[in-house]
Amino acid sequence: MMPAALPMNPVRLAVDLFCRGMRVDPSCDSLPALRRTRAGLGSGFETRLREGPRPLCVNVPVVERFAADSPWVLAPRVGAGESRHVVVNAESGEVHPLWIPDEPAWYGRPTKSSGRAMAEVGTLQGTYLGVYVGGVCGFWSGRGENACGFCTSGLNVGGPARRPVSVAEVVETARAAKEESGVTFVHLNAGYAGESTLDGIYPFVEALKSEVGVLVGVQATPARDLSRYDRLRELGADHLSFCYEFHDPKVLAEVCPGKNHALGQKAYFDALVHCSGLFGRGACSGEIIAGVEPLAKTLEAIEWIASVGAFPTVCIFRPTLGARMEHAQPPAPEDMVVALREAWNACRRHKVPIGLAPNVRVSLIVQVDDAYELIERPSMADRAWRAALAAGRVATRPVFRKRMKARST
Ligand code: SF4
């Protein structure tokens, strides 16, 4: 199924780096610190494989076991060139430019409200600000046996030694991120806190929309009482994502016992269908992990998500250190190319608009709009859909400008 002729363009390289990781040549110095946040996908180096107005941001695994065997090596550039670093394939000799953005000055700055460093409140994951809100996920209670097998959030965030972030801290950090790093989107995610999970998120959405003026996304376990989503809509939330992880219920039960037992797949499906109608086409996403269940199931998931007007967020499985699945193998890049190409095709077929929001470039995944570059020979329909999305980005600018205006001004 894999087109052998597909060149190692930046998006194809991103897939390879997600699946194979990267070694770091000892001659690389002054690299930014690795920051493990949230469920663990952001455990690697924040890099860019392409600069420009729509940079290609990739969080490259470097500490996981599989990265030690990667043919890709991060090295300083020798001689003149567009970037200070390159990534070299030690087997084939091919060399690609790679940019490592400097950490923003606000990372180390203390919040006035508590003195906590802003990087402990939220971090950039690509060009957006990712913030974990609330206490440790309920599935991590006890010895963590109910936690999802790929997750390390119980080790990274919200634990007893780490008090949850406050609304004031998030507002200050988001304001700095907006003013100094041009952030337009804040993504709030939370662990499981029962049916009232959303109650803990409402105050953050309200404050970000009224006091900062940014697009706000919410990623939380689904509420059974679907009327709870009305409140999120009233508060101005722009995006919701539902991590249902696996299409095969048996795989969900095995890998995510807590989610399966407390919620079940149906709660995710019901919430996604409901919110997709409530928030509009392309505003919600169904998030799945590719590379654990058979590829055919991942493709089924992609088709179903797009069929309900949401976009598929395809996370390439990363066996993160500390997770129950840390010894598992990452997926084959060729399979991930197939999955991502299908995500593009499904959004095109079902006319789910993707990539319209300004300056939202995500480093933890390959965005569906970028998956166009994984198509060996784009059809007329592919080219027309790509042109329609580009036109849509221009046409929706006033809408997003309005949504990014602080409600209190
Ligand atoms: S729901 Fe699963 S993935 Fe999310 S924080 Fe809890 S254990 Fe981790």
Image: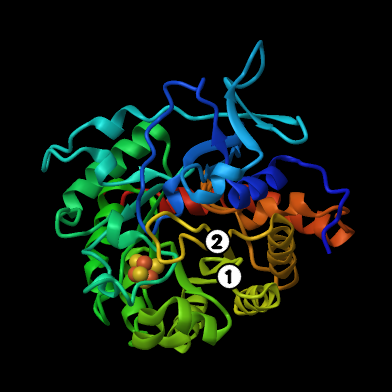
Residue 259 drawn above or below residue 235: below
Report the residue at 52% width, 66% height from top: 283
Report the residue at 32% width, 27% height from top: 105
Residue 220 shows in this picture: no
- Of the four image quadrants, the one with ligand 1 is bottom left
Crowd rating for badge 2 (residues with CA inside 10 Å; few <14, some 14–19, many 20+): many
Question: Which of 179/45 is in front?
Answer: 45
Report the residue at 27% width, 69% height from top: 137
The kind of secondary structure element at disc 2 is loop
Question: Which of 16/216 is in front?
Answer: 16
Residue 265 shows in this picture: yes
Residue named by callout 2 = 317
Residue named by callout 1 = 292
**Quadrant, the N terminus:** bottom right
Residue 178 lies in quadrant = top left
Question: Which of 256/172 is in front?
Answer: 256
